[in-house]
Image (cartoon, grey):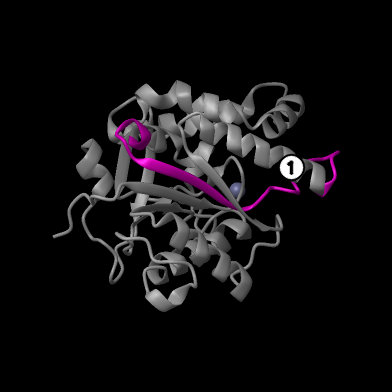
């Protein structure tokens, strides 16, 4: 039976800047407050996330926003520098993901689910799952093996809007984390992504960027019996840790 690891390092490996702040930042805040070291990584810099700026300009702006959001909880931001809407599970990206995990040595990893609304997310799922499995193998990377490196607890965040894009059904979570007390700080982290928030605000005429996040967490909160919650599905394939670490830390 696995137990809470002595090495308390959590990593999110998601596709774009703002994915972590939308999908799991409430849980990251709780982990940071509990003394965990937090790393927020994106595969792409989000260089298609603008109607007016060049790829270089919006990528630089979005990386600055990712750094600022991470700094709010003392986390470190990383970017694998793959191109937006061109994330693929290939040798180069796989190598980058393995090296990232080798350098961070997370014991807890968050990524996208197998099925999500856009392919960057699904390909990021493959990269994260592959790296989680392989990074502790000595020959998997030329980077040194940090003591305590092991196959991490792996959790899949909700797909966007919580729905499987093939069935349109809400995904059934294995794990619901109460983020009611963290919701304001989560919104502050998300608000760091001004380039995305401002675009949606002018387009929708309201603060849809923040409101959509809160609506979804309220929906998951109903399932958990609390005002706001984040939902996860734990990966329990061989040979990943089987116990629900998040529920053991924070309670059902
Ligand atoms: Zn995304």
* Quarter location, residue 90: bottom right
Classify residue 66 as left or right of residue 245. Answer: right
Q: Position of residue 117 (x, y in %)?
A: 58, 53
- Is residue 25 rendered magenta in the image? no
Look at the numbered disc 1 and say if its residue's Cβ is closer than 8 Å to ligand 1: no
Q: Is residue 7 above or below residue 92?
A: above
Quarter of the figure that contains the C terminus: top left
Q: Position of residue 107 (x, y in %)?
A: 33, 54
Quarter of the figure that contains the N terminus: bottom left
- Is residue 53 rendered magenta in the image? yes
Q: Is residue 233 above or below residue 241?
A: above
* Quarter location, residue 26: top left
Classify residue 242 as left or right of residue 113. Answer: left
Q: Residue at x 28, y 29 (%)?
A: 225
Q: Residue at x 53, y 29 (%)?
A: 189
- The part of the chain drawn in magenta is 31-55
| 155, 175: nearer the viewer | 155
| 110, 164: nearer the viewer | 110
* Quarter location, residue 35: top left
Q: Position of residue 152 (x, y in %)?
A: 33, 59
Q: Position of residue 5 (x, y in %)?
A: 23, 52
How many other residues sit within 10 Å of disc 1, few (<14), some (14-19) or many (≥20)?
Answer: some
Q: Residue at x 47, y 38 (%)?
A: 75
Mark 1 lies on residue: 60
Classify residue 7 as left or right of residue 117. Answer: left
């Amino acid at each position: 039976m696995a137990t809470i690891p002595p090495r308390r390092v959590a990593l999110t490996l998601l596709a774009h800047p703002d994915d972590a702040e939308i999908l799991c930042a409430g849980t990251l805040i709780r982990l940071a407050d509990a003394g965990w070291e937090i790393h927020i990584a994106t595969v792409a810099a989000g260089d298609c996330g603008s109607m007016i700026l060049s790829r270089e300009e919006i990528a630089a702006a979005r990386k600055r926003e990712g750094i600022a959001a991470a700094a709010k909880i003392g986390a470190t931001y990383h970017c694998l520098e793959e191109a937006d809407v061109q994330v693929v599970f290939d040798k180069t990206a796989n190598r980058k993901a393995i090296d990232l995990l080798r350098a961070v040595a997370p014991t807890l990893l968050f990524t996208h689910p197998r099925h999500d609304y856009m392919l960057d997310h699904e390909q990021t799922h493959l990269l994260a799952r592959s790296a989680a499995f392989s990074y502790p193998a000595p020959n998997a990377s030329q980077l040194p093996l940090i003591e305590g490196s092991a196959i991490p607890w792996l959790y899949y965040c909700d797909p966007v809007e919580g729905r499987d894009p093939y069935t349109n059904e809400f995904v059934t979570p294995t794990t619901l984390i109460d983020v009611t007390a963290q919701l304001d700080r989560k919104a502050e982290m998300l608000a760091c992504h001004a380039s995305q928030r401002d675009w949606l605000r002018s387009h929708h005429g309201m603060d849809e960027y923040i409101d959509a996040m809160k609506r979804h967490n309220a929906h998951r909160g109903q399932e958990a019996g609390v005002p706001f919650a984040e939902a996860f599905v734990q990966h329990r394939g061989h040979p990943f840790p089987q116990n629900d670490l998040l529920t053991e830390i924070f309670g059902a």
